């Protein structure tokens, strides 16, 4: 397992965060970007936070980056996948941004339970949770490679 890096380029960060966003650009400018990601997110505008979340693929989506496909797995009960797709849509309509969760070994059924729970939250709480999950995913991706 690798330690968190002192410096990363925007391209390296874009791979970890699934896209080149304002968050990625700001992280590329500082030392210890993955350690300091939470403090950078804290000063982002709501629109920039949403941009970072929406760069991530939806859970259960058919088109995934190689990293997301490996994390989410390719198999899933068709009924669970259908419900995931439906609840992802409900979530995005309610909150205005994508559902992001640190999957790491969870089954799609377990992720579905998390999604059901999080749909009941308030928007501000969910925006914060999604951003924390986004950072957890990026850190995990770095340490695993």
Image (tube, rainbow, N blue to C red):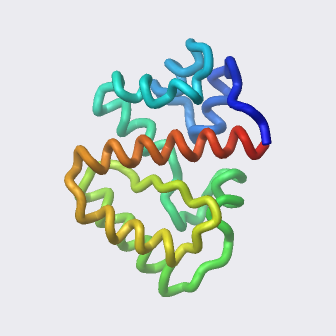
Which residue is rendered at x = 30% and y = 26% of the image? 45
Question: Residue 71 location, x and y as percent?
Answer: 66, 59
Q: Is residue 101 found left or right of 6 in the rendered image?
A: left
Question: Residue 98 location, x and y as percent?
Answer: 39, 52
The quarter of the displayed image where residue 64 is located: bottom right
Q: Quadrant of the N terminus?
A: top right
Which residue is rendered at x = 40% and y = 56% of the image? 99
Q: Is residue 104 found left or right of 2 in the rendered image?
A: left
Depth check: 120 or 98 in front?
Answer: 120
Depth check: 137 or 18 in front?
Answer: 137
Question: Residue 86 location, x and y as percent?
Answer: 37, 73
Vertical placement of residue 91 versus 10, above or below: below
Identify the residue at the far left of this view: 122
Vertical placement of residue 97 versus 135, above or below: below
Q: Quadrant of the C terminus?
A: top right
Q: Is residue 33 found left or right of 143 in the rendered image?
A: left
Depth check: 62 or 71 in front?
Answer: 71
The quarter of the displayed image where residue 68 is located: bottom right
Q: How many marks?
A: 0
Which residue is rendered at x = 43% and y = 23% of the image? 40
Depth check: 28 or 106 in front?
Answer: 106
Which residue is rendered at x = 51% and y = 47% of the image? 56
Q: Is residue 130 found left or right of 58 in the rendered image?
A: left
């Amino acid at each position: 397992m690798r330690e968190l890096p002192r410096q990363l380029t925007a391209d390296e960060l874009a791979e970890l965060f699934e896209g080149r966003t304002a968050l990625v650009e700001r992280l590329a400018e500082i030392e210890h970007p993955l350690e300091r990601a939470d403090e950078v997110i804290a000063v982002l505008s709501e629109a920039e936070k949403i941009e970072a979340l929406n760069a991530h693929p939806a859970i259960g989506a058919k088109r995934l980056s190689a990293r997301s496909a490996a994390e989410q797995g390719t198999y899933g009960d068709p009924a669970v996948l259908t419900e995931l797709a439906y609840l992802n849509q409900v979530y995005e309509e309610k909150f205005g941004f994508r559902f992001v969760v640190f999957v790491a070994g969870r089954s799609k059924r377990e992720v579905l339970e998390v999604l059901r729970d999080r749909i009941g939250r308030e928007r501000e709480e969910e925006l914060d949770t999604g951003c924390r999950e986004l950072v957890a995913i990026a850190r995990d991706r770095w340490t695993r490679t």
